[in-house]
Image: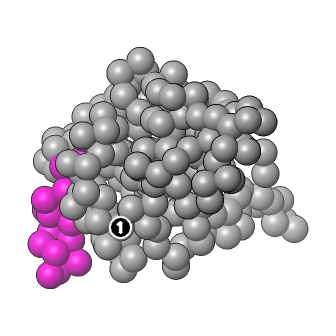
Amino acid sequence: METIIGKKAPNFSSKAVINGNEIVENFSLEQFIDKKHVIFFFYPMDFTFVCPSEIIAFQEKIEEFKKRDVEVIACSTDSEFSHLAWLNTEHNDGGIKGVKYPIVSDFNKTISENFGVLAGEYNYDENGDLIFDGAPVAYRGLFLIDKQGIVRHSVINDLSLGRNVEEALRMVDALKHVEEYGEVCPANWKEGDDAIKPTHEGIVNYFSKH
């Protein structure tokens, strides 16, 4: 599979639910170009098990993302009506009520396919009939997109493996540090740690301290 790291994020125009209660017709990543960094993440399906834990976890940290001028956007292959129903369902009934960031509908599966996270593909059987091999949902893909619309980080988990929201925040901090200071971030770097100037002297200085 070809990576999209370092490339322009595939754009789209799709229906989405914003503010937890409003369906919009033409939601697009283009509206954030030159304005915000974006965390764009996919999840498999509404009204499931791991998915609400992730979506609510991002909402619980939404102010941390806002402080960093980052827009959080979710996406699955469900319809906008399914998203809206889920957003109006209480947590103790398996819902995600209270989530306010946008949730995009990828009902025709083209967004998931373009980002390389669709858990299957269309094919033909021995009779020449069009079929879908695999699961017609998205893997748990997450993409960090800079203000120029370039994908700078991604992680893709299998359907049963939830992601770490703190790690997403750490990667945002790392990217913003690189952009601001021109330094590179070593393993396990977090905000406040030493980074490395990308020169021989910078590497020597870093390892002399560690």
Disc 1 residue crowd, few under 14, some 14–19, many 20+, Cα 10 Å:
some
Of 206 and 88, the residue lying toward us: 206
Left or right, 58 with reference to 95: right
**As rendered, which of 172 and 121 lies closer to the eye?**
172
Toward which corner of the image does residue 78 lie, by quadrant? Answer: bottom left
Label 1: which secondary element:
helix
Q: Nearer the viewer, residue 170 or 125?
A: 170
In the rendered structure, the answer to whether residue 202 lies left or right of residue 65 reads: right
Horizontal and vertical percent position of residue 104: 37, 45
* Residue displayed at 87% across by 68% down: 126
Front one among 189 and 109? 189
Taking the view exactly as shown, the residue that stands out farthest to the right is 126
Q: Residue furthest top?
A: 34
In the image, residue 147 above or below residue 137: above
Q: Which residue is disc 1 drawn over? A: 54
Residue drawn 36% across the image and 80% down it: 49
Q: Which residues are magenta?
A: 85-102
Quick check: 198 left or right of 96? right
Q: Is residue 53 above or below residue 191?
A: below
Picture residue at 73% right of the left edge, 45% below the top: 204
User: Could you tell me residue 65's position as x and y percent?
Assistant: 29, 45
Q: Main secondary structure of the magenta part?
A: loop
Residue 26 lies in quadrant = top left
> With 58 as the anchor, is 196 left or right in this view?
right
Task: Say which amino acid is labelled 1.
Answer: Glu
